[in-house]
Image: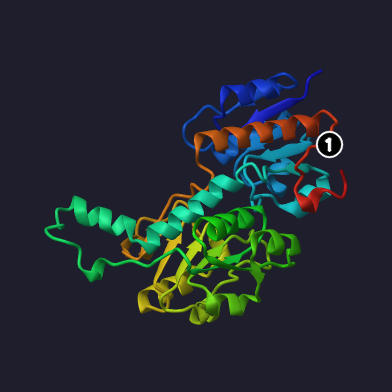
């Protein structure tokens, strides 16, 4: 008898077909996120769940007595209650690596967009304010040959560093929980302690995964170390930064600008101060959002799930859950 899988969002037909080769598929077909109560009901007889952000906690697991595996269409898995999943022996998988270059491209879109004030100048032109040559009040900052600091030197960090060093001839430093000698050698980057990196960098890119140790890693004390001319970019998770401290730093001129793809609360509230700041470039959490990459992520998540519930070892079990598989 085939195992049953529930898919809690719309996925490409090819992804559904891959799962259907091995499993009975049930799915949510609404355009809005599935209501929590309905999700819990749908999991009553499910062996597997394919998701991209539904909270997997003790409550959900109580309603899913047959559940064996959860596969998320994302690199981040902070929506997994690791302790609850470990107690139940649930396999949890994610989709690292496939989106590295796409997210690195977005990092540079934010770097260039903030440095050259692209969104501001677009509005300036469209609002009919361009009557003569732009004065120096519209000047931006150079990206080439500037100093870039990367917080979190995983594969995405390395992809950002590669673009910075060989595309823009930037001087790249990084801070990470462990040093990366191979990256230092291949990419010509150097390791710095966090405070030193913040002091030196013209651009700071936050790429650290969200963990208890990185929650609000960057706060008031850290923003005071950053140069007033520097720009802060966050494409990791909103909770890695003290948002109130970032607002204060931007309003006071402690830092020059910010490019953000992630926020403490998502979607960002309509009355959020960021949305009123010309020196903040705000994107709707689209780091991996290209058609090709999202397709590849969904297909990888599907394969992870199929492997997990058919007795194979998935390629991408989240690190904290690898010990009992």
Identify which residue, 303 or 245, lies in the foreground. Answer: 303
- Classify residue 287 as left or right of residue 132: right
Res 272 visible: no
241 to 95, vertically: above or below: below
Identify which residue is drawn at 54% across, 81% down.
221
How crowded pointer 1 is (Cα within 10 Å; few <14, some 14-19, many 20+) is rated as some
Please state the horizontal and vertical placement of residue 184, each as a whole percent of the image: 69, 64
| Identity of the residue drawn at 79% across and 42% down | 90
Work out whether 303 lies above or below 262: above
Which quarter of the rendered picture does the C terminus lie within? Answer: top right
User: Element type at marker 1?
Assistant: loop
Placement of the N terminus among the 4 image quadrants: top right
Q: Is residue 97 left or right of residue 316?
A: left
* Image quarter of residue 281: bottom left
- Residue 291: where, in percent of width, then height? 51, 34
| Residue at (41, 58) in percent of width and height | 112
Vertical comparison of 220 with 122: above or below: below
**Label 1 sits on residue:** 313
On screen, residue 130 above or below 217: above
What residue is drawn where x is 61% and y is 22%?
14
Query: Which of the pair 324/64 is nearer the observer?
Result: 324
Name the spot of residue 39 as percent of width and height, x first. 61, 36
Q: Nearer the viewer, residue 41 or 11?
A: 11
Outermost right residue = 324
* Residue 282 spot, x, y in % from top left: 40, 56
């Amino acid at each position: 008898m085939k195992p049953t899988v529930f898919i809690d969002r719309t996925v490409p037909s090819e992804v559904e077909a891959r799962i259907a080769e091995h499993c009975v598929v049930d799915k949510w077909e609404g355009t809005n996120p599935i209501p929590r109560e309905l999700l819990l009901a749908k999991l009553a007889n499910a062996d597997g769940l394919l998701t991209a952000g539904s909270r997997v906690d003790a409550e959900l697991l109580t309603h899913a007595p047959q559940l064996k595996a959860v596969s998320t269409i994302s690199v981040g898995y902070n929506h997994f209650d690791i302790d609850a999943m470990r107690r139940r022996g649930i396999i949890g998988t994610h989709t690292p690596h496939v989106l590295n270059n796409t997210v690195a491209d977005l990092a540079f879109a934010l770097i260039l967009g903030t440095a050259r004030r692209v969104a501001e100048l677009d509005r300036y032109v469209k609002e009919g304010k361009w009557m003569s040559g732009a004065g120096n009040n519209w000047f931006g900052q150079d990206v080439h040959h500037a100093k870039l600091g990367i917080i979190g030197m995983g594969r995405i960090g390395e992809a950002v560093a590669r673009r910075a060093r060989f595309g823009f001839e930037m001087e790249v430093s990084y801070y990470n929980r462990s040093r990366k000698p191979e990256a230092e050698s291949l990419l010509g980057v150097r390791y710095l302690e966090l405070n030193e990196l913040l002091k030196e960098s013209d651009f700071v890119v936050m790429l650290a995964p969200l963990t208890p140790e990185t929650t609000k890693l960057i706060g008031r004390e850290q923003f005071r170390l950053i140069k007033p001319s520097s720009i802060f970019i966050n494409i990791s998770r909103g909770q890695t930064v003290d948002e109130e401290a970032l607002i204060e730093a931007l309003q006071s001129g402690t830092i020059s600008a910010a490019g953000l793809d992630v926020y403490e609360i998502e979607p960002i509230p309509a009355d959020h101060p960021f949305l009123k700041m010309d020196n903040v470039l705000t994107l709707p959490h689209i780091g991996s959002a290209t058609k090709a990459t999202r397709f590849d992520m969904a297909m990888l998540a599907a394969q992870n799930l199929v492997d997990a519930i058919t007795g194979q070892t998935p390629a991408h079990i989240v690190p904290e859950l690898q010990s009992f598989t």
